[in-house]
Image: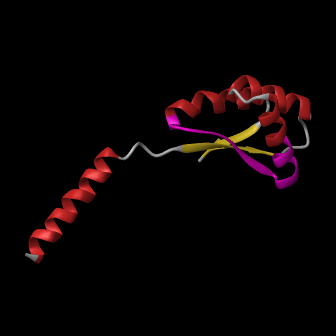
Amino acid sequence: MIWFDQTKEQEEAALDLATEPSRLHEIILYNDDVNTFEHVIQTLIEVCEHTPEQAEQCSLIVHYKGKCSVKRGSYDELEPKCIRLHAAGLSAEIV
């Protein structure tokens, strides 16, 4: 009977893995001494589809903490957004 229970648990674990969504990634935005708050806020609104309030909060977190997660999603979804952030002169990476 113990063997059956272990097999059932293994099957359930395999099913959980099979139905688990793909791993989410984040874009981390880093502080710099070059870009203005206005530029960072406008870029986050345009690229990451933030509300003005979200963008302002993220810019303040980046300023005071040095970095902030600004967007979550699949790697394929985030890569073009990160490229656009770089093109706008911002320092960011996908983790």
Residue at 81% across, 29% down:
52
How many numbered circles are shown? 0
The N terminus sits in image quarter: bottom left
Residue, far top:
46
Q: Is the residue 46 above or below the residue 53 in the image?
A: above
Query: What is the x, y in percent for residue 63?
Result: 87, 47
Residue, far bottom:
2
52 displayed left or right of 47:
right
Task: Using the rendered image of the protein, determine whether residue 88 is visible from the camera's viewpoint.
Answer: no
Query: What is the x, y in percent for residue 14?
Result: 25, 55
Q: Quadrant of residue 65?
A: bottom right
Q: Quadrant of residue 60?
A: top right
60 displayed left or right of 8:
right
Foreground pick, 94 / 11:
11
1 displayed left or right of 53:
left
What is the image's colouring? secondary structure
Residue, far left:
1
89 displayed left or right of 48:
right
Task: Using the rendered image of the protein, determine whether residue 80 is visible from the camera's viewpoint.
Answer: yes
Q: Which residues are magenta?
A: 59-75
Q: Is residue 85 magenta?
A: no
Residue at 82% across, 26% down:
42
Residue at 15% across, 70% down:
5
Q: Quadrant of residue 69?
A: top right
Q: Is residue 72 magenta?
A: yes
Query: What is the x, y in percent for residue 19?
Result: 32, 45
Query: What is the x, y in percent for residue 10?
Result: 21, 63
